Each structure stands twice: as structure tokens, then as C-alpha cells.
Amino acid sequence: MAIVFAFLATEKSSAAEPKPEKNRLEVAIAATGPLYLPIFLANEAGYFARRGVTINISVLSATASAQALLSGQVDIYQGGTAIIHANVAGSDLIYVAASVDRSTLVLFGQKGLTTFDSLRGKSVATTSVGAFGEIAVRKTAKEHGMEIGKDIKLLYHKGPPDALSTFLLGNADGVIVTPPQSEMARSKGFPVIVDYYERGLKIIGPGTGLARAFAQKNPNTVKIFLMGYLDAIKRAIDDPAYASKILTQSSKITDPKLLEDSYQGGLKSWNKDMAVDPEAIKVVLEQSTVPKAAELDPKRFFDNSLIREVNRDYASKLFPGQVR
């Protein structure tokens, strides 16, 4: 019955839905996995297409995605800190929504390494420079009176699979990753040093990033993207079997337990109210290696006007009592 409701809510709202200024969107994502499941589900289920927008999804590194946004090759980037770093460097890239704003990163150690202090003088595998893995480790290192580069060496990789591979081969003493790679490490019995979700670390990853000028020129198209994304969150919650099917297709996860654990990881992370929290921006700025980045106003890095409209007119109907 709940699944039917999702479709009824969509159809009921169709009369008031915006007409797109642009009928095709190039969307880049930083990785696959449960945090990115809604965009694959929305595309597969036709939630964008029924509103007149075709979506092409590609997986790009954070640096490549930021450059692609600036050149116009990509319209939307569903990812992490690349938007903030590009903005700090002078590009007018912003977030317009935060589909996830609480970190699911987990820091593991090789067997026998169970505390953060035990990583002193050792290496930790992570993803790209400036990504959330680095930010989280830098933050924790400061809390322990340690410095990245001096007390802990970070080993950078293209993405979570590569970082995990380095760790599993024994070429790193620690690894910081998100699901499904974190579930893979957990299933192999590696000790958890820090579970950042349990710590309540606020980050935007993935968030909906784009050029401010694109949002100003194509507000209806952006709202359609956000509405389709919210439809997918609703469907993923109401229809676990379908969500798991799409997760298998997009992430190539076939092990039943790993699939279930990954789905549950996404379930606790997807935002129904996708407004950007300035505190999630502030965390990144505070750990930036760019001089005076911490002094910048977090409000310059996002614009909640479109998601506020979508929440008011659409998400509040999909998730009554949960979104206003």
C-alpha cells in the first residue's frame, strides 16, 4: 500500500509540477553504493523522465567533476567536497541540496590496531585529496594532538574500492571508507577505530552541486531533479526489494548479507529534508589547508531556495509530518 501511495503522490502533484527549461541533464557522481542508490533508482523508475527530463549518469573523480561543471560538460555533480574546494578557489559552484549530510565514513585499522593513537607513525588509505576521508582524519588527528603528514601518512586513491584494496593487501595500516567498502572491511573482522556516523559528524556527501548560474537559468529543471530524487528516496524506503535490486545493478553487490547491510546503511543516511546545513560546510572549511578558508562564510557555498520550495510543495506531501 505504501508503494502505491508513492505513485499517487507523484500523480496528484503533477498539475503543479514545473516545466523544464532543459530536457537533458549530464549528472556526475563520485562513486556508487547505497549513498548514491536514489539517483540510480530515480532514473530506472522513470521519475525524471515522466517530468520531461532525461538523465545521463557518469562516475567521475571529484577533481574531474568540478572541472566538468565549470566547463559545462556536466550539469550536476552528486558528490562531496569538490564543490567547496572549487568555491574556495574562486569558482561559483554551490550546493542546492544535501541528499546526505551525516557522515557514514568508518576508519578501520589492521588487526591489532584498535585506537586512533595506534596509528601514530603509520599510514591510512583514503580517497582523493581534500575528500571527506581526509577531512575526517585531519579533524580526529587534531583532537588527538597529531598532524597529517607528520604523525600519520595519508595514501590517496581514485575511489573507495582502490583504497580498500590497498588496505586489504596490507599496504596501509588503516583505511577510511563508506558503504559498501566499510561493510566489506567489517565483514572481514577488521577493527573499527572510529565510526563517524555514530560520532554524528556532519558532512555533505553526496550533495547536489552545480554552477550558481546554471541554477539561476534552469530553476525548474533543478527542481524536477530534486523531486525525482525525493521520489526515489520514498520508493527505496517503501520497497526494499526494488531498492536492493537497483543497488545490485549499480554497485555489483551480490552477497545477500553485504547487500542488506549496505541497504541499511543507505536507509539511515538518506535525507528527506535535503536543505543544506551550514555546519556541514563549516567542518570542511575548518580542516582546509587553504589559508583563511576557515574564516569564510559558509552561506556563500549553498543556496537552499530551490529545495525549500520543493520541500514545501512536494516533499511535505511525500513525507507528511517529517518535512515542512
Image (cartoon, helix red, strand yellow):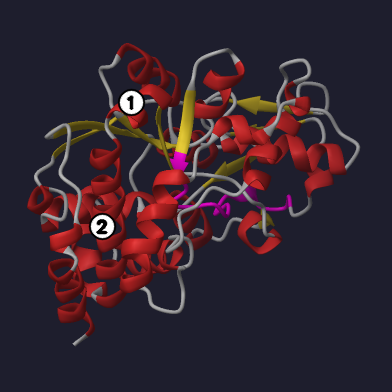
Q: Quadrant of the N terminus?
A: bottom left
| 135 drawn magenta | no
Q: Nearer the viewer, residue 124 or 37?
A: 37
The amino acid type found where label 1 is placed reads Phe
Image position of 68 with respect to 251: above or below: above
Q: Residue furthest front?
A: 16
Q: Residue furthest right?
A: 145
Image position of 161 with respect to 33: above or below: above
Q: Residue at x 42, y 64 (%)?
A: 272
Left or right side of 127 for 215: left
Tell me whether circle 2 and circle 1 mark residues in contact (CB < 8 Å): no
Task: Bin the neighbour count of mark 1 within 10 Å (Cα to Cα): few under 14, some 14-19, many 20 and up.
Answer: some
State which tag comes first along the sequence, 2 or 1: 1
Nearer the observer: mark 2 or 1; the answer is 1
Q: Residue at x 35, y 55 (%)?
A: 310
Find residue 7 and report its image quarter.
bottom left
The amino acid type found where label 2 is placed reads Leu
Which stretch did the figure color magenta?
96-113
Q: Position of residue 225 (x, y in %)?
A: 26, 46
Q: Nearer the viewer, residue 75 or 217?
A: 217
Q: Which mark is residue 214?
A: 1
Task: Bin the neighbour count of mark 2 within 10 Å (Cα to Cα): few under 14, some 14-19, many 20 and up.
Answer: many
Image position of 257 with respect to 37: above or below: below
Q: Position of residue 75 (x, y in %)?
A: 28, 27
Q: CA distance from mark 2 to mark 1?
A: 30 Å
Q: Nearer the viewer, residue 71 or 222?
A: 222
Q: Position of residue 21 (x, y in %)?
A: 17, 33
Q: Residue at x 77, y 43 (%)?
A: 140
Element marked by disc 1: helix
Q: Which mark is residue 247?
A: 2
